[in-house]
Image: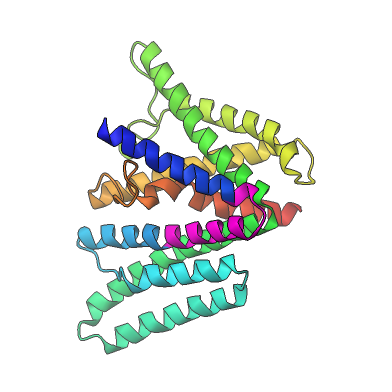
């Protein structure tokens, strides 16, 4: 009961902040969006590097999340040149640490893991921020379709598993035992249907039939992000990425699907608009 109350409280707070960032077009909305992006960047990268360190890998869990948050801040302010400078500075610092290290083998492993963590998060977050600056409603569309595809896949997968005598057909049980082909079909249909309905409201200025393509792409991106995080945590021997958000868990668990979808959808719109 206590966990349920914590989860409900956290969800209400997060949703209130999220919808304020979307529908308040003034300084308040933009400030809340910027704060959320910077905090999510810092904590998701910190969780990622902490998991790496906990599984006997080398990584820097102080500099890496700090530079990810700094890059996100520059993107929020639309100082994209400074975001590039931050990325270059991060690389220079990593190589400097390598040259000054007494154990260069450990330093090299730390550089590789830290750099991978930085770019795996920083690039999608910058692209997500770019989508928000294009239009808060486009960003809202991305989040809604991503979450609807997840929920649709979960509900259909759960129902078909209960109704089938031998259970449903698992996709990759070694990575995610809950993922099934039946759930995937339900998820992609929900994503395409929701996309078709929501697309006209977001004023993309693109043909309606593209909404079906976008819905399908976002479903597969969402599933890929979820599976990638599950594989990463399973490989490192952890269940939850963290405990930053009461009742919900880690920030990485919250944004895993959006990381891939943000990058994919930004490229999708860039070449079509």
* Residue nearest the observer in this picture, 155 or 16: 16
Residue 201 in percent (x, y) is at 73, 38
In the picture, residue 83 is in which quadrant? bottom right
Q: Does residue 151 lie above or below 125 as drawn?
A: above
Residue 209 in percent (x, y) is at 75, 35
Residue 273 in percent (x, y) is at 76, 53
Q: How is the image coloured?
A: rainbow
* Residue nearest the observer in this picture, 242 or 154: 242
Residue 157 in percent (x, y) is at 43, 24
Residue located 54% across and 33% down the image: 148
Residue 24 is covered by the magenta coloring: yes
Question: Which part of the image, by quadrant, shows the N terminus?
Answer: top left
* Residue nearest the observer in this picture, 2 or 101: 2
> Is residue 16 found left or right of 101 in the rendered image?
right
Residue located 48% across and 57% down the image: 36
In the picture, residue 162 is in which quadrant? top left
> As drawn, which residue projects farthest toward the bottom?
100
Residue located 77% across and 36% down the image: 208
Q: Does residue 232 lie above or below 74 as drawn?
A: above
Magenta span: chief secondary structure: helix
Q: Which residues are magenta?
A: 21-41
Residue 219 is covered by the magenta coloring: no
Regarding residue 22, the answer to whether it shows in the image is yes
């Amino acid at each position: 009961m206590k966990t349920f109350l914590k989860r409900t409280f956290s969800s209400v707070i997060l949703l209130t902040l999220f919808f304020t960032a979307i529908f308040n077009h003034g300084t308040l909305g933009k400030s809340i969006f910027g704060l959320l992006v910077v905090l999510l960047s810092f904590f998701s990268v910190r969780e990622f590097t902490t998991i790496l360190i906990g599984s006997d890998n080398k990584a820097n869990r102080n500099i890496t999340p700090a530079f990810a948050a700094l890059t996100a801040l520059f993107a929020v302010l639309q100082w994209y040149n400074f975001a590039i400078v931050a990325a270059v500075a991060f690389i220079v610092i990593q190589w400097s640490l390598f040259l000054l290290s007494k154990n260069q083998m450990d330093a090299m492993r730390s550089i590789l893991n830290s750099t991978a963590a930085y770019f795996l998060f920083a690039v999608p977050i910058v692209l997500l921020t770019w989508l928000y600056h294009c239009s808060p409603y486009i960003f809202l569309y991305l989040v809604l379709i991503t979450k609807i595809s997840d929920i649709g896949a979960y509900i259909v997968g759960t129902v078909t598993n209960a109704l089938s005598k031998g259970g449903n057909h698992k996709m990759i049980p070694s990575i995610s035992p809950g993922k099934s082909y039946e759930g995937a079909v339900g998820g992609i249909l929900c994503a395409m249907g929701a996309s078709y309905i929501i697309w006209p409201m977001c004023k993309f200025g693109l043909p309606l039939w593209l909404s079906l393509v976008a819905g399908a792409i976002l479903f597969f991106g969402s599933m890929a992000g979820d599976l990638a995080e599950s594989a990463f945590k399973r490989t490192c021997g952890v269940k939850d990425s963290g405990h930053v958000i009461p009742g919900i868990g880690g920030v990485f668990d919250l944004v895993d699907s959006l990381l891939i979808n943000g990058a994919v959808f930004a490229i999708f719109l860039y070449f079509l608009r």
